[in-house]
Image (spheres, helix red, strand yellow):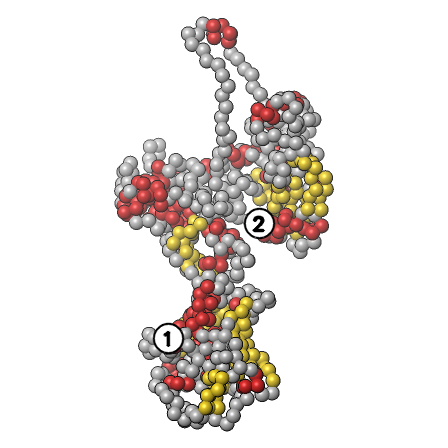
Amino acid sequence: MDLVAVRTMRVAHSRSDLVLAPGEEFMAGATWLYSESQPDVTGLVDLSAMGWAGIASEPDGSLTVGSMTTIAALAEWGDAAMVGASPLFRQCAESLLASFKVQTSATVGGNIARSFAAGAMIALGATLDATAEVWGPSGTDIVPVSAIPAGNGLSSLKRGEAIRAVTFPAAALASHTAHRRIALAEHGRSGALLTGRRDADGSCVLVITAATATPVVLRYATVPTPDEVVAAALAATGYYSDALGTGDWRRAVSATLLAEVAEEPGMTYSVNGAPVPGDPAPGQCLRTFLREAGHVEVKKGCDSGDCGACSVLIDGQAVHSCITPAQRARGREVTTAAGLAPAGELAPVQEALADHFGFQCGFCTPGMAVTASTLDAATVADPAALAKAMRGNLCRCTGYRPIREAITHAVCGTAEGCGGCTRTLARPEASAAPATSGPGVGATVTHPAADRIVAGHEPFTFDEMPAGTAHLAVLGSPHAHARVVAIDASAALAMDGVLAVLTHADSPDVWFSTGRHEHREDDPDDTRVIDDTMRFVGQRVAVVVAETKRLADLAVDAIRVDYDVLPHVLDPEAARSPGAPVLHPHRTPADRVADANRNVVASAHDATGDVEAALAASAVTASGTWQTARVTHGQIETHGAVAWVADDGRLTLRTSSQVPFLVRNEPGARARDGARQGARVHGTRGRRVRRQAGDVLRGHRRARDAAHRPARGL
């Protein structure tokens, strides 16, 4: 509308122009000013030329917003920003009673200075502990935004004072936030606006605006209980009545909604419908965050988004949690294999995987079930579409057929070769009958641990840790052949929480084989726990032991090594040729190394009967050289072991293996005589070493590789 009482209008360009004459008022976005008659305003001072528009991220991580920045521009910044509190900017902007056309004109500073109870920028500023830089006739003041409103539409700013900029501190920007709003109409003026934030230290701020004449700011050292929140909201003062609601109504709805804010997943991460305390570290992936929170049903496999063992749902969408930033799950619902069905039950696809024996080791199965739970019948009924949908979930054991049949049965109700299996199959773990009267030969049964496996509850090596377990990280060699000249671990050792850095100087001078068979004499002694000569890229140079894995990894990066790089070849034929660099010059046949001077570890020459006569009598003979590609057993479970000294003094190792006694013997026992060659690396007798293993179906042949276990023992 026209402001008929206004006689003058001038544009301010400098601080001296801000001195107000009688009857003058500042004009920012003008959206409110021109919406009502202003009989007492005879002059306007336009602030648009003061250069106060703009948004700047400061070196300390804080955010400075010029007061003439539009609300729409600030909301757009929040949409694009990768900070914890970014959703709150748009949520508060949308809580303003205004169309988008008003938001593109209304300013941040003007909204705060007007001090209406439903001022959306007041709610934003109060929640994030924003401060206003106020210019006035007597100088500059820094004022908390929450302190500017003195009543509904009544500002504490003195005449002639103007907000130049608003600053949001870095800690608040990094916080988790939540928001609730209620109005008589969906897009009407807010009857109550409830906001909150949770900081990295666990402290919590809850704010009531729109329902009260001035902001109510509640601060807690930790997230309060719903009862505590309700009590505080009901006890707050300042609730008012108008045509849009009574004070009692505003008080009641504020108490209810503020309690919801405190429980909002944005305030605490939500996994399987339950809040998860704590905050992920910068750069932490969702998988490690979930496992640290106790959700070990989320398995660590490839760590690169290939195998799918870590699959979870975020708002119903399957993702690889190992390549998903943990912060991306804030304010969203995460579902793991353990949450696909109510506690104690299984989802249909999990039941089918159990009944079809769609696993062997079971490590991939929880992630397989998570992904399969998202598929529809049209996808599953098409073999090509099913294969494509599941290609991000790998299985080392089954060959996929039982998995395909299980998914088809679960989604479509039948499967080729299925036979219409149901949950009426004999399930030993659920049977109340004595074992002697259970199913006999020829009966169809499920694996005793099937239900636990498909839900992710069957523990693997790293799923159960003794209290206070330290973490070990290995610094691998960047060179194929080199001699370690010097190691500087001082920076790593100076880190708080680093317990030890071990090098070749700490390693027993005992050679052993990383590939054990039934008799240790079958394999060459060609390895030390940590050596000072590197013979392949990735060989152990140093080992860090720290209180957390993250710290151990950081400490590894802090170690500095001087290498004398030696010649090397990368082709087996070249390695056997004269003049090739020799990797084990001191190994002899007594160490079960066939020909160290030609880099030949083992050779086999055998014959039965008269070979020459047999060849001479053959109608056809063939001769040649045959070779195979490198073969890996390709298990998905992480290579590793957990070691601790038990109460009885035994060194205890937990690994996944088919050969528990071989694993026990190699790291532990001392050979007492030439005939007894037990495991002996660390000079302890075999009976002083205990090795734990789960179901042998979960141990692959690659698990015979004992390379990592002596390091744990060390």
Q: Residue at x 40, y 40 (%)?
A: 359
Q: Nearer the viewer, residue 436 or 365?
A: 365
Residue 196, image x, y percentages: 48, 71
Quadrant location of the N terminus? bottom left
Q: Quadrant of residue 192?
A: bottom left
Residue that label 2 marks: 466
Q: Is residue 496 above or below residue 199?
A: above
Q: Is residue 84 above or below residue 455?
A: below
Q: Is residue 290 visible?
A: no
Q: Quadrant of residue 400?
A: top left
Q: Disc number at residue 222?
A: none
Amino acid type for the residue under numbered disc 1: Lys
Residue 445, image x, y percentages: 35, 38
Front of the two marks 1 and 2: 1
Residue 17, image x, y percentages: 54, 86
Q: Residue at x 68, y 46 (%)?
A: 560
Left or right of 619? Residue 608 is right
Q: Nearer the viewer, residue 43 or 220?
A: 43
Circle 2 SS class: loop
Amino acid type for the residue under numbered disc 2: Pro
Residue 39, image x, y percentages: 41, 93
- Density class for disc 1 (Cα within 10 Å; few <14, some 14-19, many ≥20) is few
Q: Is residue 426 above or below residue 569?
A: below
Quadrant location of the C terminus? top right
Q: Nearer the viewer, residue 432 or 555?
A: 555
Residue that label 1 marks: 101
Q: Residue at x 49, y 46 (%)?
A: 304
Q: CA distance from mark 1 to mark 2?
A: 60 Å
Q: Is residue 252 above or below residue 518?
A: below
